[in-house]
Image (spheres, coloured by chain):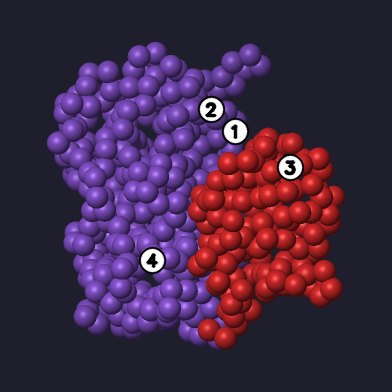
Amino acid sequence: MQDLTDLYQSVILDHNRRPRNYSILPTANRVGSGNNPMCGDQITVYVKLEGDRISDVSFQGSGCAISKASASLMTVNLKGKTVAEAEAIYADLHQMVTTGKVDEENFSDLAALAGVHQFPARIKCATLGWHAALNAANGDERPATTEKPGD
Amino acid sequence: MNPAWKNIRGDFPILDQQVNGKPLVYLDNAATSQKPRCVIDALSQFYLRDNANVHRGIHTLSMRATSAYEAARDRTAKFLDAAESGEIVFTAGTTDSINLVANAWGDENLKKGDVILLTEMEHHSNLVPWQLLARRTGAKLRFLPVVPGDSGSLDLAQLDRLLTSEVKIFAFTHVSNTLGVINPVAELCAKARVAGAISVVDAAQSAGHMPVDVRAMGCDFLALSGHKMCGPTGVGVLYGRKTLLDAMPPYRGGGSMISNVEYFESKWAPAPQKFEAGTPNIADVIALARAMDYLDDLGREAIAEHDEKLAALAYSRLAAEIPGIRMLGPARNRSGVISFDLPGVHAHDVVTMADQEGIALRGGHHCNQPLMRKLGLSSTSRASFYFYNTEEEINRLVATLQKIQQFFVG
């Protein structure tokens, strides 16, 4: 399974087995949820917002290795960032998982998700937690979904 | 093994290919089956030689198309052992067939306080149309439970308690698309009849896999999809008892379903034309009839026997050789649909990795979310077999799942 190591890099396998910040955050003042109706995956993201800064973030839910690892990496990368910074990181991540283009300077461990672009069916797995987190940070209480409303 | 099965793969050109550098192992037959060359040929022959619109034409091609289309109805009646061809309505598939019954029979016959009895294992296609009907009429839904545990059988001990006189419709699947359970449909239909309810059988997973005989079964309605039984996509069948079809109002209006049209009102054609508004799916209906010929040439008893042998072998090998695997559905008397949970590995990861080995599986909730919740799962992996699968492919599946487990769990 040589090719799969592109998708399932050791960083991803590690975050899947031992997801970071995988808990309910008692101090959270924003909660976002996301679901993928195509596969039944669900995620809840807890955000503690101080001013416009994400001072703490955690998540829980059920999902595949890609969605779990991506959400875990997200919590590590967003902690301490402003909402605007978080959105910029997500924009880069989105470009990376859809095109494979990695911005080495800004990315560090998130680059492990670059292989996702070779598996188009799995892109939504990699972005679900981020949608939920950014919705929460922006005060949008609606659940994030991988499908458009009405689908 | 029956020698007929040895060369069967030659009938399915699609099976002879490499996927991700490995010979394709197609185990997603519960989603859709592959098509034999004779069905593909029937489709292209129609478009190459016979294509014309049906029913209203006088010219030769139209008469040829009409006669092939109506011959397909006769063929379907024979395939299902219906009393007459007028009991066969061509639809877009199982979902369309069930929606037809829910709308045309349901809207006419249900009122507030009535009950629609379903089972806990229904595919969304045999659940959501009834939810919509309940919302329109004020009728209530009720569910025959699946027994606790993973065997997946219906809890028949509760049936008499639930099948009360308020129940007007009892709809259930013949074979579960998630659990592989084969339900005792004749018994369920008989109970419905005694209780004064109509029976609606979802035969999507059974029609191409075993004998499906509506008179022996005693059902009032039965729905199937062509594409799961070697036929094309976009075509299906609704069998309906003639007296019920005759009494039902139309479901959709348009050409072909009328006997006389005035500006302000119209008279309907008799069933089944009443339910086939607009130009029907002529080519696919004709190709579906060819698929029925193909299945009957193999013999549906023989297909069922072969399916069950493969399923029993796959089930027992997965249970024995994959440590910690959770198998769903019964070990025996099952169809070729095998769902399982590999602890520590999400179904989507199983399916992605299997695909890299050329194996087509399905992972997810299988349009069966409420049942998944009841089983405490959000998704499972599913391998579903058909008569062209082989023991060698089971070897590949077992070896690949062992590899996947090693990769994720170590």
Amino acid at dot 2: Ile
Considering only vertical position in the picture, is B246 above or below B389? above
Viewer can see residue B66: no
Of the chain colours in the picture, the one used for chain A is red
Considering only vertical position in the picture, is B361 above or below B53? below
User: Do tag 2 and tag 1 residues touch (Cβ < 8 Å)?
Assistant: yes
Eye-nearest disc, 4 or 3: 3
Amino acid at dot 4: Leu
Residue B292 place in picture, x, y as percent: 36, 59
Closer-to-camera residue (A2/B410): B410
Residue B372 place in picture, x, y as percent: 39, 48
Q: Which residue is mark 4?
A: B342
Mark earlier in primary sequence (1, 4): 1
Which chain letter matches label 3? Answer: A
Q: Which residue is mark 3?
A: A49
Amino acid at dot 1: Gly
Is disc 1 in the same subunit as disc 3?
no
**Disc 1 versus disc 4: distance between alpha carbons?**
52 Å
**Disc 2 versus disc 1: distance between alpha carbons?**
7 Å
Measuring 59% from the left and 33% from the top, which residue is drawn there? B255
Of the chain colours in the picture, the one used for chain B is purple
Measuring 43% from the left and 78% from the top, which residue is drawn there? B410
Eye-nearest disc, 1 or 4: 4
**Disc 1 versus disc 3: distance between alpha carbons?**
61 Å
In the rendering, which numbered label is found on residue B258? Answer: 2
The secondary structure type at the circle numbered 1 is loop
